[in-house]
Image (cartoon, helix red, strand yellow):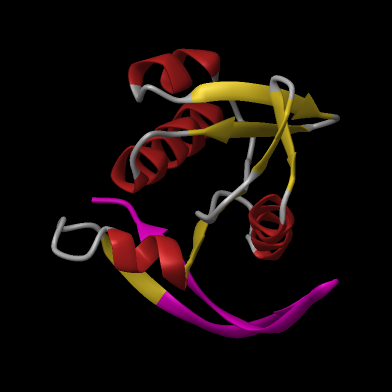
Amino acid sequence: MRRELARCRGREVKTTGDGFLATFDGPGRTIQCAQAITVAAQSLGIEVRAGLHTGECELLGPDISGGIAVHVAARVAAKAGPGEVLASRMLKDLVSGSGIRFKDCGRHVMKGVPGKFALYAALAD
């Protein structure tokens, strides 16, 4: 994970038990990194799930654990299946025209977050 984070210019924020929280300076690199991590983990016989979202975050020292965007990202990850890279519509819309393909996974209620969120599985090339 850390090798792919470095390659895609991601920044590790913290680990969360068996999870990983990272930030990126671009939405395309976020998807690219999650897909690369998924492939690398599968080669080791490990299935990971990735949930991607973008938004404003509260900085709490070196941590970004505050803010609704962090909570939404965690809820998106919880909806992802093994080996799946699942993104919110907001992230999907930011990479429009990039050639990244998605499968519509419907609208979902996220625990503790108002409204329904459209989710999309990023498809590997």
Q: Number of marks in the image?
A: 0
Residue 110 placement (x, y as % from top left): 75, 74
Q: Quadrant of residue 8?
A: top left
Instruction: Look at the image and tell me whether residue 121 can be seen.
Output: no
The residue at the point 64 percent across, 56 percent down is 69
Q: Which region of the structure is painted magenta?
A: 104-125
Residue 94 visible within the image:
yes
Q: Residue at x 36, y 65 (%)?
A: 92
Q: Is residue 114 above or below residue 33?
A: below
| Nearer to me, 10 or 85 | 10
Q: Residue at horizontal 46%, vertical 22%?
A: 5
Measuring from the top left, give residue 70's x and y in whole percent.
Answer: 68, 50
Please give left or right for residue 48 compared with residue 31 in the image. right
Q: Report the residue at 53% width, 55% height from top.
A: 55
Is residue 60 found left or right of 49 in the rendered image?
A: right
Q: Is residue 26 left or right of residue 14?
A: left
Instruction: Examine the rendered structure and indicate whether residue 119 appears above or below residue 26.
Output: below
Nearest to the observer: residue 2 or residue 124: 2
Q: Position of residue 45 (x, y in %)?
A: 61, 30
What predominant SS class does the magenta segment belong to? strand
With respect to residue 120, does 35 lie above or below?
A: above
User: Residue 73: x and y, percent?
Assistant: 64, 55
Q: Quadrant of residue 96?
A: bottom left
Q: Is residue 29 magenta?
A: no
Considering the image in quadrants, where does the N terminus appear?
top right
Viewer-proximal residue among 106 and 117: 117
